[in-house]
Image: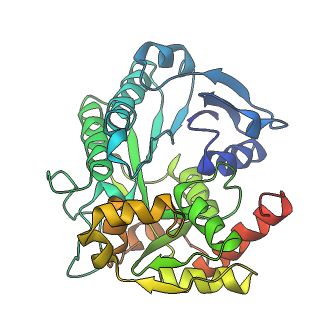
Amino acid sequence: MRVAVTGSTGHIGSVLVPQLVAAGHDVRALVYGDASVLDGVAVERVTVDVRDRESLDAALAKQDVVIHLAAFISVRAADDAMMHAVNVDGVRHVAEAALAARVGRMVHVSSVHAYRTWRLPGPLVETDPAALDATDPIYDRTKALGEVELRKVIARGLNATILNPVGVIGPSDHLPSLMGATLRDMYTRDLPLLPSGGFCWVDVRDVADAALMAMTHGAVGANHLLSGGYLDVKELHAIVRECGGGAPLMRVPTFVLGLIPPLMGALRLSGLLPSSFTADALYALRTRLEVDASLARTALSFEPRCVRQSVRDGIAWWRETGALA
C-alpha cells in the first residue's frame, strides 16, 4: 500500500516508518524540519506543515493510508497556542485533506490524555469522558478537541480509526521525548529530588505495531487504548539504577510540589528536579491511572511487552548511540 506518515521523524515515526518499508509498503514521509533520522530509509520525503491545510493536499494525493503522528507535546502553559494549532487544527487539516484526496484509511495516533484521567473509580476504558472541561490540562484538552474535529470529518465520510497510547517509552527516542529526557536525567545525574506518583506506559514498538494493524483493522471512529502497564516514579528510577544510573537523595510527594508552584519552578531551574516535571506533568503523575487495553488486544492483536524491559531497552539504545555520558 501507499502510506503517508505525518510526524515521521518523531519517536513513534522513527520506529514505524522503517517497519512500514520492511513490510513492503510505499512510504511517503511527511516531514517538518530536520529529517536526518530517516537517512538510509527508502522513503519519499515531502515537507509539510499540518498547520497549513494547503501543504497537505499534494502530500496526500494518491495515498491509500495516512497515519497521523504529528503532535505538539508540552507541559508548559506558554505553548498553549502552538498545542491548539497542531493538535486541534492540524488534525482537522489532515482529516479534511485525506477526505478530499479519497485516502482509503486514516489512523490517528492521539493520546490517553484525550480522556479525563483524574482519580477514576476503575481502569480507563474507551467510553469514558473526554478531557473537554476547563479544569483539564491544556494539552489534554487539545488532544480531546483534535478527536472532536476528526469525528466531524468522519461524519462526512472519512474512514478513520483512533489509537490512544499512554506514556510512550523505549528505544529510538532520539529527540528525546519529555519522558525520555527525564529517564536520561535519572541515568546521568544524581537528582536530589524526585516526585512521587506514577503513570501508565507503553513501548514505542508496540504502538508502531498497533498502527500497522490499524491500517486494516479497528472500527471506523473507534478509540483503542494502548497500555503496557503502570509503573510509579520510584520503580522507574530503580530500573534506571539497575542499568547504572544515578541516585536521588529523597522523594517529595507531588501534592506538596503542587501546592507551591514557584518552589517547583525554582527547583527545576536549579536542576534539583527534572525540567519536565511541571504542574501539568505532576497532575498526570497524581492521577493514579489504570488503563484497560482489552479492546486493542481484540481488535488490533495488541500484545504489549513488559514496561520494565522497555526502560532497559531504551537505556541500552542510548548507550549504543552514544547519547549517554
Could you tell whether 89 is left or right of 16 in the image?
left
User: Residue 283 in the image: x percent, y percent?
Assistant: 30, 67
- Who is closer to the viewer here, 203 or 244? 244
Can residue 126 be seen in this snapshot?
yes
Up/down of 315 relative to 98, above or below: below
How many numbered circles does the render carry? Answer: 0
User: Residue 66 in the image: x percent, y percent?
Assistant: 52, 34
Up/down of 257 relative to 142, above or below: below
Quarter of the figure with residue 252: bottom left
Can residue 216 be seen in this snapshot?
no
Up/down of 284 relative to 7, above or below: below
Could you tell whether 17 is left or right of 214 in the image?
right
Question: Image quadrant for the N terminus?
Answer: top right
Q: Residue at x 45, y 69 (%)?
A: 298
Could you tell whether 216 is left or right of 123 in the image?
right
Q: Residue at x 69, y 51 (%)?
A: 174
User: Residue 234 in the image: x percent, y percent?
Assistant: 51, 85
- Who is closer to the viewer here, 181 or 292? 181
Q: Residue at x 75, y 31 (%)?
A: 43
User: Residue 130 in the image: x percent, y percent?
Assistant: 22, 56
Question: Image quadrant for the C terminus?
Answer: bottom right
Quarter of the figure with residue 17: top right
Question: Colour scheme of this structure image?
Answer: rainbow
